[in-house]
Amino acid sequence: MIVLIAAAIVSGLATAAILAPVSALAALIIAPLAASASAILACIFIAWRNTRDDVGPPDLEAQADAMVAVLCEVAQQGKMVPVAAPVRVRGHRSA
């Protein structure tokens, strides 16, 4: 949101500064329009950039699914191994 506000303010001031020597009335009329257009373009650019980053994660999700499957297999193998009885060594129990 701050980026959109900054883009609008900067482009509005730049447009007003460029048009002020030509016509003060034109600067007052066109500067807000240029600021609004700049904010809209910045909004579209931010949305495009965020959706473009979402193209990659299916590969990461496939890798995560494969890792979960491997972990489930290891857990199943761990359930098959018999649990050893506790051992007493010189009066102390070991885990």
Image (cartoon, grey):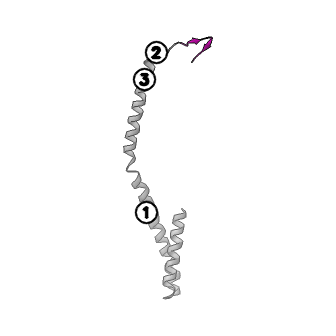
Report helix, strand or loop for mark 2.
Answer: loop
* Residue 68 image position (x, y, % from top left): 42, 33
- Image point (51%, 75%), residue name: 12
The residue tagged with tag 3: helix, strand or loop? helix
Which amino acid type corresponds to the residue marked 3 in the rendered image?
A: Gln
Residue denoted by label 1: 45
Where the C terminus falls, by quadrant?
top right
Q: Position of residue 78 (x, y in %)?
A: 44, 22
Q: Position of residue 83 (x, y in %)?
A: 49, 15
Q: Position of residue 34 (x, y in %)?
A: 47, 75
Figure check: 86 above or below 12: above
Q: Is residue 67 left or right of residue 4?
A: left
Magenta stretch: dominant SS?
Answer: loop
Query: Which one is closest to the eye, mark 3 or mark 2?
Result: 2
Name the one closer to the observer, 37 or 17.
Answer: 17
Which residue matches tag 3? 76
